[in-house]
Image (cartoon, rainbow, N blue to C red):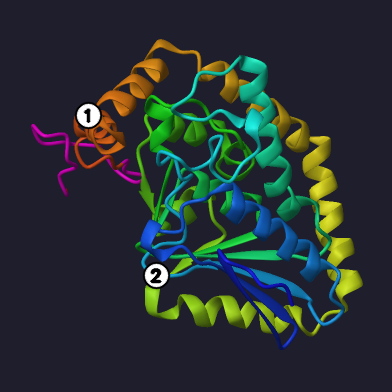
């Protein structure tokens, strides 16, 4: 088994568990982590003992997005020199090149033969949703939090599986505001397959992996592949490539440039605070009216 720095891999009882292991950063995605994740996924796909893969996060969250801290994913960090990043100006082709490079790593989830179950607790935000929604099945805690707040002023989504899971209207509602929903609400709109009470999440996921362990891996692969081919016929794989290019386009928006300027001059925390304070609690309501107080927080009715 490979020696990893940013993930933990366990293989037993017909499954590979891959744990994102940057808990102090809420498992924020760096290029190094994504590289290790892709390598571990392909290793699991090649392991005859493995029938399915479980992806989960260490600590309090599944994944709080991409790591955009200074010095990470920029030249001198852990990504190729052409990468650029939040704090460095690049051409649009450099930007798209960087986005496509990381996308190829994530697409292992979709392209590998064996099924992947995302076990989501806590925050599943921004890049965390890219990992979860490229998995084959998402099972979440009722109180998990799903959303893509960077769509407010940092670009568009570099992956786009929201459309295929929750449909165009909810995809637009959530992506045009960056508002979040709970795991329970995500189940209602079809963004995830199921949500369960937090204390039952692991048992629910492991139980499904137990059942998959009873099936010939070649048959699991055949049944995953035919569904994913159907998604490809509906344009899903092409849309992922277009999503990366579209994110490069969105990075040229005046609002995005302003966020980058504030982050560079005042720090990332200040830029995020300025962005999100206008949105109150940042929540959407799936069922029932959205009535808010003067600070933009949802009022329970």
Q: Which residue is mark 2?
A: 59
In the image, 225: left or right of 145? right
Residue at the limit of the structure toward the top, as seen here: 254
Q: Please say whether residue 232 is one of the residues in the magenta stretch.
A: no
Q: Residue furthest bottom?
A: 13
Q: Quadrant of residue 208?
A: bottom right
Task: Name the residue located 80 percent from the left edge and 49 percent from the top edge.
Answer: 228
For the point 31% across and 35% down, the residue is 268
Looking at the picture, does residue 234 appear above or below residue 261? Answer: below
In percent of the image, x 73 and y 72: which residue is there?
Answer: 52
Q: Outermost residue, left direction?
A: 294
Relative to 209, residue 176 above or below: above
Tell me which segment is drawn in magenta: 284-300
The residue positioned 91% from the left and 71% from the top of the image is 218
- Residue tagged by mark 1? 274
Look at the numbered disc 2 and give the secondary structure of its residue: loop
Q: Is residue 170 left or right of residue 50?
A: left
Residues 190 and 157: in front is 157
Q: Is residue 198 left or right of residue 89?
A: left
- Residue 234 at what x, y percent from top left? 78, 35
Where's residue 236, x and y in %?
74, 37
Asked whether residue 144 appears in the rendered view, the answer is no
């Amino acid at each position: 088994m490979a020696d990893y720095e940013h993930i933990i891999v366990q293989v037993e009882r017909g499954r590979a568990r891959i744990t994102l292991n940057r808990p102090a950063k809420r498992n924020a995605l760096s290029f190094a982590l994504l590289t290790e994740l892709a390598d571990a996924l392909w290793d699991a796909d090649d392991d005859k003992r493995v029938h399915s893969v479980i992806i989960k996060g260490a600590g309090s969250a599944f994944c709080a997005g991409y790591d955009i801290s200074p010095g990470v994913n920029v030249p001198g960090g852990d990504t190729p020199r052409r990468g650029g990043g939040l704090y460095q100006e690049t051409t649009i082709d450099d930007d798209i090149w960087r986005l496509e490079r990381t996308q190829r790593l994530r697409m292992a989830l979709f392209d590998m033969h064996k099924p992947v179950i995302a076990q989501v607790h806590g925050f599943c935000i921004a890049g965390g949703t890219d990992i979860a929604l490229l998995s084959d099945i998402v099972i979440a805690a009722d109180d998990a939090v799903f959303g893509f707040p960077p769509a407010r002023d940092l670009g568009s989504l570099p992956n786009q599986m929201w459309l295929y899971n929750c449909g165009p209207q909810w995809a637009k509602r959530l992506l045009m505001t960056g508002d979040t929903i709970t795991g329970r609400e995500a189940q209602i709109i079809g963004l995830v397959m199921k949500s369960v009470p937090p204390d039952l999440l692991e048992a629910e996921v492991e139980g499904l992996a137990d059942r998959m362990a009873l099936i010939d891996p070649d048959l699991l692969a055949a049944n995953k592949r035919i569904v994913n081919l159907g998604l490809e016929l509906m344009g899903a794989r092409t849309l992922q490539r277009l999503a990366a290019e579209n994110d490069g386009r969105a990075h040229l928006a005046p609002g995005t440039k302003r966020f980058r300027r504030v982050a560079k001059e005042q720090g990332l925390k200040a830029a995020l605070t300025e962005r999100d304070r206008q949105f109150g609690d940042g929540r959407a309501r799936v069922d029932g009216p959205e009535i808010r107080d003067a600070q933009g927080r949802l009022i329970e009715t």
